Amino acid sequence: MIQLLANTRSKEYPVFLSAGAMAGAGRLWRSLGNEGKVVIITDSNVAGLHLSSLAQSFAASGASVQSVIVEAGETAKSLENTTGLYSRLFALKTRRRDAVCALGGGVVGDLAGFVASTYMRGIKLIQVPTSLLAQVDSSVGGKVGVNIPEAKNFVGTFYQPDMVITDPSLLKTLPRSQLVEGLAEVVKYCLISGEDFFANFEMSHDEFLSLNLAYVEPVIRRCIEYKLRVVSEDERDFGRRAVLNLGHSVGHGIEAAGRFELYSHGQAVALGLLAAVRLSVQVLQLPGEYPERLETLLKLLGLPVRIEGIKPAQVIDAMASDKKADDLSANMVLLRRLGEPVINCDVEAGMLRREVERLAAEA
Ligand code: GLY
């Protein structure tokens, strides 16, 4: 079992990583000195796959276990569901010595994490991520929150979990589209982490797609380790943590322009990464080979490299409204080299517009 340590200003906590780790969740939780009840929050897709084994693991270690199932999908991340969950926790007599355990992908992690961070001013939180996106990114670092009708993730907190159980074997039950979607975040970590990681992933991505866990586990480990380093330096996202947003400004514009239906988060991030790498060549003299290498890799992974069904102007408008300003020129994360992301890059509005148009134009 690999044990990584998250060391943030607000909390230190272990991330247990290995195929089969979920079966040991109860024992690991107990070994950290926890004795209270565990309320597992999961969704209607994940419940049928993993809820009973996780509940059994906690029960076998002597914990009393309860579960609450929310509907699957982004709509679950609502304030209405949040208040519903507070009431369920209250009805279950959940108190501060007890824990919420988020079993699921990014949506469940964000929702259950937000509930745990606010119920009784914060109770214990365990993250058991089941999607690739959640395993490599959202389950660590403590960003939790919900949507309001006007905007995604607009209400939230920074709330680090007390334990994360990352079990790559759970990815075997993931629909292929969700696996591929999560790969966009893996590619992001390759780009911000360094040429060696990127080159290795270019060569061995098939091993990931076929879920050869001997390859998958070290890749996930490298993503988590990178994120833990960044979050230990900048937990509250005042500066360096922004490197994790590579590809996300254009990506969010694409997601929003497609009304969060046309492109999944991962697909939009893939397109955003391509735009960011192309801009990096122009603005920071990133070596010119990378846009083509990235495009080839994204295609091999089954991620989009071209926008279809929305107009570039819609993406630009969505980006402007995301920033609540017309000036699109600041705050992009770009790359000077692989492994050398630069935050707050000044990209001239015309240049950005041309790159978004290029995403829509190229065959
Ligand atoms: N997913 C980006 C962050 O946690 O800051």
Image: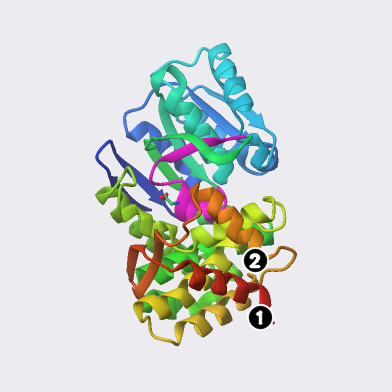
Amino acid type assigned to the residue bearing label 2 in the image: Pro
Res 146 → quadrant? top right
Residue 137 drawn at (x, y percent): 46, 53
Disc 1 crowd, CA 10 A, few/some/many (<14, 14-19, 20+): few
Looking at the rendered structure, the kind of residue marked 1 is Glu
Q: Residues within 10 Å of mark 2 (few under 14, many from 20)?
A: many
Q: Is residue 277 visible?
A: yes
Per the rendering, the mark at residue 239 is: none
Task: Reply yes or no: does residue 131 show up in magenta.
Answer: yes
Measure the C-alpha gap from mark 1 to mark 2. Answer: 12 Å
Which residue occupies 52% across, 32% down?
A: 112
Q: Which mark is residue 362?
A: 1
Q: Which residue occupies the foreground of this view, 226 or 258? A: 258
Task: Give whichever of discs 1 and 2 has the lower sequence position.
Answer: 2
Dot 2: element: helix
Judged by depth in the image, the label closer to the viewer, 1 or 2, is 2
The residue drawn where x is 50% and y is 46% is 324
Residue sitting farthest toward the bottom? 289
Relative height, residue 360 to residue 256 (above, below): below
The residues colored magenta run 130-148
Residue drawn at x 56%, y 60% is 251
Q: Which residue is mark 2?
A: 312
Q: Position of residue 16 (x, y in %)?
A: 39, 48
Image spot of residue 11 (x, y percent): 28, 37
* Figure check: 334 above or below 116: below
Say if 101 sits above or below 91 in the image: below
Task: Give the vertical position of 196 relative to 46 (above or below).
Answer: below
Kind of element beneath mark 1: loop
Residue 348 spot, x, y in % from top left: 44, 69
**As rendered, which of 320 and 344 lies closer to the eye?**
320
Task: Confirm or reject: label 2 Cβ below 8 Å from ligand 1.
Answer: no
Left or right: 120, with 226 as reference point? right
